Amino acid sequence: MKILYFTSTGNNLYIAQNLGGELLSIPQLVNDNIFDIEDDVVGIVFPVYYATSPKMLREYLKKVNIAADYLFLIASYGSDGDQNALRIMTKTLEKRGMAVYYTNSVLMVDNYLPMFDMAKEKEIKDENDILNAINIIKDDILMKKEFKLSKKMFTNVPFIEKVLESTMSKKFKIVVGEDCSNCKLCVKVCPRGNIELTEEKPVLGDNCEFCLGCVHHCKNNVLNLNQEANPDERYINPNIKVSEIIKSNNVG
Ligand SMILES: Cc1cc2nc3c(=O)[nH]c(=O)nc-3n(C[C@H](O)[C@H](O)[C@H](O)COP(=O)(O)O)c2cc1C
C-alpha cells in the first residue's frame, strides 16, 4: 500500500502513519516530478481547506496517474466541509479515469488560526476519539470496503476554489514581526519553498499555500496573522516530530 499525504501541522501525517504502508509526501512528489503511482492499494490523506483540498493537491490530481485496484481518500478536518472536499476530489479523479472506492474523514484540531483558538481546539478534540476513528478506517481499508461520503456543501466548485479561497487569502495575511532567532524552521516546513531568510528575517514569496505551517512552527511568534482567534496558541500534532514535518515539506 502507498499513501500520498499533505500536512502542515502533522494531523495528516499522523493518520497516514497509523494506516501504514509506504508514505509519500505530496510536496516531495511534486518537487521530484513523480506523477505515476502504482500499487494494489493507494490512498490520499489530506486536510480540508475551504471545503476543498489544498491548491497543491488539486494541481497534483490534475496530473497524477494512479494505477491501483483499490483507491481511497481520507480527509482530516476541524469543523465542516469534509464531504464536499471528498466529493470534489473523487470527481476530479474519476473524470480522469481513476475509480475511487472509499472516502472517509477524521475530525481533528482545526489549525485555521484566523477563526479557531488552538487552546480550545486542543481541549475539545479528544485523542482517543481520533485514534478510534482512524482505526475504524484502517479496518475498512483492510477489508477493501466500498463506501463514500459525498454530501454537497456548495454546488458551485469554481466558487469555492476561486472566490472563497481568494477572498480569504486577501482578508488574512501572514505578518512578519521582529526578533527572529534565525532558526529557519519556517523555511524548512514550507511545502512550496516560498520562504527565504533575508537579513535574518523571513521573507515570504508570492507562492504561498496558506497552510499556516510557518506560523504554527514559529517559536518566537515572529510570524503571526493580521487577525487571529488566539495569537498566544499554536498547534503541532503531539504525536508527530517537527523533524518528520520537515522531511515531508522541505523542498529547499
Ligand atoms: C487554509 C485552511 C483552510 C481550512 N479550511 C477548513 C475547512 O473548510 N473546514 C474544516 O473543517 N477545516 C479546515 N481547516 C482545518 C484543517 O483541515 C485541519 O486542521 C487539518 O486537520 C490540518 O491538517 P494538518 O495538521 O495535516 O496540516 C483549514 C485549515 C487551513 C490552514
Image: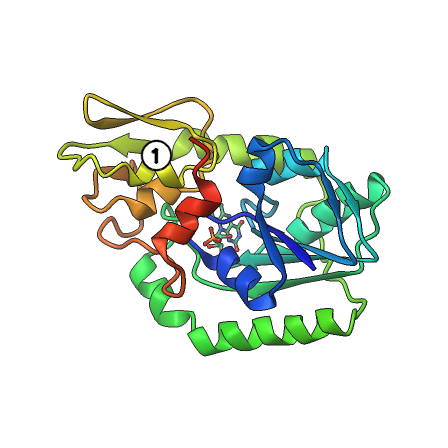
User: What is the quadrant of residue 133 in the picture?
Assistant: bottom right
- At which x and y percent is residue 89? 71, 46
Q: Is residue 228 visible?
A: no
Task: Residue 215: give x, y in percent of width and height.
Answer: 32, 42
- In the picture of the structure, the residue carrying the numbered disc 1 is 187
Image quadrant in which the N terminus is located: bottom right
**Color encoding of the figure:** rainbow
Amino acid, disc 1 = Val
Q: Position of residue 203 (x, y in %)?
A: 30, 24
Q: Secondary structure at mark 1?
A: helix
Determine the residue located farthest toward the right in the rendered image: 97
Q: Position of residue 57 (x, y in %)?
A: 61, 40
**Which residue is found at the position 42% from the left and 69% from the top?**
125
Q: Nearer the viewer, residue 223 or 85?
A: 223
Residue drawn 45% across the image and 30% down it: 208
Identified at 53% across, 63% down, the residue is 17
Please determine whether, in this image, residue 135 is positioned above or below residue 154. below
Query: Which residue is at 43% across, 30% downward?
Result: 193
> Which quadrant does the C terminus fall into?
top left
Q: Is residue 111 left or right of residue 217?
A: right
Say few, some or many: other residues with alpha carbon within 10 Å of mark 1 (under 14 / 14 to 19 / 20 or more): many
